[in-house]
């Protein structure tokens, strides 16, 4: 978990970000320069395009969060003073190569205050420092570090070209929003179904969102999610692909995009639409465990049709796939599945009408 810093670090670190995963938030991009022409490879214009799509970049941080949240989380570029399209340049009057990036971050923070006579975090929600090549991660540490961010705080820091990679951007801002990593097989970054796993050195890919545990934490799908405090009898549920969020009824007991049973989170990870480049568990019903928000999520199962997974005396069975929906039976372990009589296991109530049985009965004269 080297790319997380939790409540340590830079000179103005006393201000914790008020976690806001909905609404509009601003991002200030700081392009750091030093002596001997040390500066990031990409220009201010290119950085703005990568983060905000200001010059037509088809995939960018702003667009990813907009799509995955269905318009609930919007990032806008910082404005005012010397900012242009969300980017400002700050020059440090000393050589940068070989400096510890954490020490350098402190110097950047102080240089910003000297230039503007205010701290950026008093005006903007998120700040990203873009460092030139040659800094080290820790005194005498490696120069090949990629990016890191402060949990539940405003700051993320990128090593040169890494600021251009879509997955790195979305991942590090995710840390600012309070997200820890998505693990699998005891690897902290091992769950590659969403952006809080491994990153990729690709400008406009992969197009994917967050796993079930992170989606529950972000809260974007709450009105179309279902929490089962306990499972005392068998029931059927249509688990819709989360990318079809707009087509799913609100507060339904039988058609949802996300399910939580205890500390287990269930999501249909279809490889299409806003999730067309998910890197793992494609077209599977994923089950991820996360007890506390400060924990890594842990991938526990990826189910295809006819697969089942049991935990805490509960069994989840993927009966079949139908029209971007996974037909699930959830029942106490040892009880009978509802897969053989799926319609009979649906629970009515909440928003919307239970899905029409297939085939549709003939109309009554």
Image (cartoon, rainbow, N blue to C red):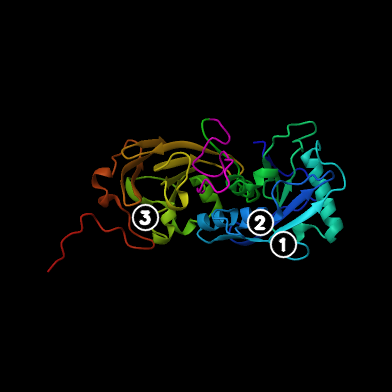
Left or right: 198 as drawn, with respect to 260: right
Circles 1 and 2, Cβ within 8 Å, touching? The answer is yes
In this view, the residue in front, 277 or 13, is 277
Query: Marks 3/1: CA distance?
Result: 45 Å
* Number of the label disc, if any, that sits on residue 48: 2
Left or right: 66 as drawn, with respect to 307: right
Residue 255, compared with residue 104, is above or below; it is below
Res 11 seen here:
no
Quarter of the rendering containing residue 100 = top right
Q: Residue furthest front?
A: 37
Task: Name the N-terminal-most of marks 3 and 1.
Answer: 1
- Horizontal and vertical percent position of residue 306: 31, 38
**Label 3 belongs to which residue?**
255
Chain part drawn in magenta:
186-209
**Label 1 belongs to which residue?**
84
Query: Marks 1/2: CA distance?
Result: 9 Å
Task: Name the N-terminal-most of marks 2 and 3.
Answer: 2
**In what element is the residue under mark 1?**
loop
* Number of the label disc, if any, that sits on residue 194: none
Identity of the residue drawn at 24% across and 56% down:
357
Q: In front of the other: label 2 or label 3?
A: 2
Mark 3 Cα within 10 Å, few/some/many (few <14, many 20+)?
A: many
Res 275 seen here:
yes
Circles 3 and 1, Cβ within 8 Å, touching? The answer is no
Q: Is residue 207 magenta?
A: yes
């Amino acid at each position: 978990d080297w790319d997380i810093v939790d409540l340590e670090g830079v000179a103005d670190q006393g201000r914790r970000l008020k976690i806001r995963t909905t609404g509009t938030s601003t991002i200030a991009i700081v392009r750091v320069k030093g002596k001997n022409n040390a500066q990031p490879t990409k220009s201010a214009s290119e950085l703005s395009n990568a983060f905000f799509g200001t010059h037509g970049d088809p995939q960018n941080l702003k667009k990813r969060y907009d799509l995955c949240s269905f318009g609930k989380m919007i990032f806008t570029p910082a404005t005012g003073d010397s900012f242009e399209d969300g980017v400002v340049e700050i020059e440090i009057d000393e050589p940068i190569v070989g400096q510890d990036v954490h020490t350098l971050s402190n110097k950047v923070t102080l240089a910003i205050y000297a230039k503007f006579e205010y701290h950026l975090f008093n005006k903007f929600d998120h700040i990203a420092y873009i460092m030139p090549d040659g800094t080290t991660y820790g005194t005498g540490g490696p120069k090949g570090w990629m990016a890191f961010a402060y949990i539940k705080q405003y700051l993320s820091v990128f090593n040169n070209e890494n600021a251009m990679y879509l997955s790195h951007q979305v991942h590090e801002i995710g840390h600012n929003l309070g997200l820890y990593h998505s693990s699998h097989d005891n690897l902290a970054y091992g769950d590659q179904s969403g952006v809080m796993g491994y990153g990729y050195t690709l400008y406009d890919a992969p197009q994917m969102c967050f796993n079930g545990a992170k989606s529950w934490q972000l809260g974007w799908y709450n009105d179309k999610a279902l929490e089962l405090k306990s499972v005392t009898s068998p029931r059927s549920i249509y688990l819709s692909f989360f990318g079809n969020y707009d087509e799913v009824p609100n507060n339904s007991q039988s058609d949802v995009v996300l399910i939580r049973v205890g500390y287990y989170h269930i999501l249909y990870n279809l490889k299409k639409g806003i999730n067309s480049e998910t890197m793992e568990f494609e077209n599977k019903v994923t089950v991820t465990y996360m007890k506390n928000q400060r924990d890594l999520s842990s991938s526990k199962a990826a189910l295809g049709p006819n697969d089942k997974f049991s935990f805490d005396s509960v069994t989840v069975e993927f009966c079949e796939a139908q029209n971007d929906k996974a037909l699930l039976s959830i029942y106490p372990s040892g009880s009978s599945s509802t897969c053989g009589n799926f319609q009979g296991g649906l629970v009515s109530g909440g928003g919307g009408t239970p899905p029409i049985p297939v085939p549709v009965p003939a109309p009554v004269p």
